Amino acid sequence: MSMNRREFLKGAAVGGATAVAAAGASSEAQAITLMREPKERPEGALGLLYDSTLCVGCKACVARCKEVNHMPVEIYPDQSEWNSGTWDTAKDLSGKTLNVIKAYMNGTIAEKDRETDGFAFIKRQCLHCVDPSCVSACPVSAMIKDPETGIVSHDPDRCIGCRYCVYACPFGVPKYDFEGAFGQIHKCQLCNHRLPEGKMPGCVDACPTGATLFGRVEDLNKEARQRLSLKAGDAYTYPRGDISGAIERPRSPHEKVISAEYQQEVYGYDGPLGGTQALYLSAVSFNKLGLPHGTDNFGRKIPDHAYARETEGVQHFLYTGMIAPAAVLTALVLMAYRNSEKHTSEAEED
Amino acid sequence: MSTTHEHTPLGGRLVTPPFIFLVVICVLAAIVLTQRFVFGLGEATNLNDGYPWGIWIAIDLIIGTALGCGGFVMAMLVYILNKGEYHPMARAGLMTSLFGYTLGALAVMIDLGRWWQGYNIMFPWLWNANSVLLETALCIFAYIIVLMVEFLPAVFERFGMKEARRRIHRVLFVFTGLGVLLPMMHQSSMGTVVVILGYQLSPLWQSHLLTLHFLLTALTMGYAIVAFESITSSLAFRRPYEMSLLGKLSGIMAWVMLVFFIVRYLDVIRVGGFPLAFAGDFKAVSFWIELLLGVGAILCLMPKGLRESPRYVFLGASFMLLNGFLYRLNCYLIGYDPGTGYQYFPSMGEILVTLGIFALHIILYLAFVKNLPVLHATGPARATA
Ligand code: SF4
Ligand code: SF4
Ligand code: SF4
């Protein structure tokens, strides 16, 4: 080594600082150069449209989801006295609950769909992301996105229970069942066991108001866009069930007068986080309902792109074709060979 | 003095009072593990739907393997940068790497929620090439095998297998190369693992440069653990300090630490996280402690005069270890906010298992240095501890 250690390390210090400065020139631009190509929603993508203004909070969908997916009811430890299992009290998604209705409440909670002194409901289940973090994260391909329907399903026979998907999902969806010795990951799979039987997802089937609709994402998006322009006092005819009316029997629509105007966005269609196949409409802002939107708890912008593009970008940059590691290894081995030669000859002298 | 005779076993009694204390901790950990495997993770840990990873991952694996970086950083110095003078310290580093990585892998197996099909990770047809976690897992396995091969000469020497030792020496350079590359890949990727957390990780830690930061902390912690172990074993076994080497090593440590420090905090400013350091919350406090530990390490190791003093080198190495420790804990747990009101603090059982793994590390260290030629010969050794 001709360069002495001090110079080498000083060089490294300067180099490191330069790297940060270069990266900092535009952190957004830097992210983009290393980001993997975005993913497109499949043409035949299936999904849900949940309209918070229609939801009456009856939780029929929660009960039906449990029924059709054979999930147990949720009894929290402090309820064991009075709850023998007839009362499902799910507050959040868990190893027992694939679908939950939560409420936003503010001040006097006087009026529905109002941000101040009001309340609103939100249905939470897997959003079947266009570019899912869970699929990118899973080491053993136990999270799978169907190339045609875009449904993200889980294969417990592959899963090793590392829970990286739980950690990585930006919507807090997959949950590991911590109870018992043989836990499993649980998440909504858009009732993909019912679709081949010609049945719609349980939650959609159960919904009395059409707050949760099922169908092709393109159709759901069209429907959702029409609602955005409605003004308070307008009457609108809301469909129920499967939006195409093809699955099971067609459901009768119902008319409702708009009382609160919609947020001017179909949440999930164009993002954030790369877009989803479960779409949301709401009168109160989406982040009030607990969906990542706008800025996060720390004041950063929630990006439009999927985080998987960032990690895979770094990963592909370093490891595509294993070219860079192979080159580094060759250099290391050559240097190790040259520098250990004298040790070898010494060893042989013994 | 030829290479083969540089190292000698310390000899001495293995079962001493401190040793028994360590064994007791391991037994307690084993009891918790029985509970974990019979009744499940929920019974033994405080893991929950918001915090799927706890200290078994954040400390035992993410930090534990960093403490296992002594081998690779010393190999880099001796065989790659050709600093032959550090050769006497290389083997002890190698051995701690072997333990650090093996115990890290053990922690993963304990933590796996579906351990009975953990072998799925070995099936190439299930591999998800996009998964950063897969890469880290495969690197760990490959590196443990490489470490075992790298450590074989010590075993051959112990049992006088001269022919075997000579043969392995001829191919060892390949494993030396792998033994530097694999931990670099693994350590840096453990940084990439948390990038996917996105907005769930505070901007005090979230960055596209996490990959680089984790590589740098592998270096800081790797050098620090070598110095730390050298001094503690000198104290424990009443051997003379390896001050001539330690002094020089401290110089390297100081500069590596400075590089990490500059890169890390410029990066916090770059991502706009710095204002959060004044938020007055637990995350901010943890950020400042991490930063001060870094400053402490640099102050103890940078001035040339202090490097000759075992006390300051020890202090500096300890600060450096704690800085890396806290940095990684911050990235994986403290800076993480699932945003739904979930909380996590490790259970007694989790803490016991973590302590048990560290205790096992020390037990193995004692057993090995006393019976195998790991530490370099320094005249008559008087093993007592
Ligand atoms: S919401 Fe979470 S679990 Fe569902 S597809 Fe997206 S990343 Fe996966
Ligand atoms: S817990 Fe299972 S599904 Fe989730 S990432 Fe790990 S192996 Fe994949
Ligand atoms: S689609 Fe099926 S699994 Fe998903 S929330 Fe609805 S009922 Fe539950």
Image (tube, rainbow, N blue to C red):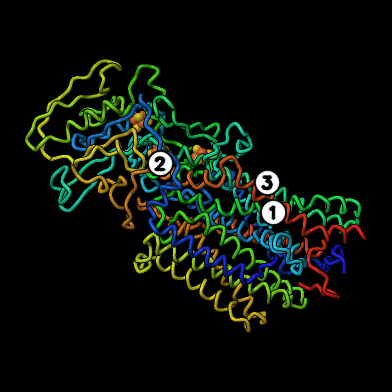
**Label 1 packing within 10 angstroms: few (<14), some (14-19), many (20+):** many
Q: Amino acid at mark 1?
A: Leu
Camera-near label (1 vs 3) is: 1
Left/right of residue B164 with respect to residue A7 in the rendered view: right
Q: Is residue B96 visible?
A: no
Q: Picture coordinates of residue B369 (x, y %)?
A: 78, 64
**Residue occupying image coordinates x 35% and y 50%:** B340
Q: Picture coordinates of residue A137 (x, y %)?
A: 49, 42
* Depth order, front residue of A327/A246: A327
For label 2, the residue is A94
Mark 2: secondary structure: loop
Left/right of residue B33 with respect to residue A268 in the rendered view: right
**Label 3 packing within 10 angstroms: few (<14), some (14-19), many (20+):** some
Distance Cα–Cα, label 1 vs label 3:
17 Å
Same subunit, tags 3 and 2? no
Q: Amino acid at mark 2?
A: Ser
Identity of the residue furthest to the front in this view: A2
**Residue occupying image coordinates x 53% and y 63%:** A15
Same subunit, tags 1 and 2? yes
The vertical placement of A233 against B293, above or below, is above
Same subunit, tags 1 and 3? no
Camera-near label (3 vs 2) is: 3
For label 3, the residue is B142
| Tag 3 subunit | B
Q: Amino acid at mark 3?
A: Ala
For label 1, the residue is A332
| Tag 1 subunit | A
**Residue B221, located in which quarter of the rendered image?**
bottom right
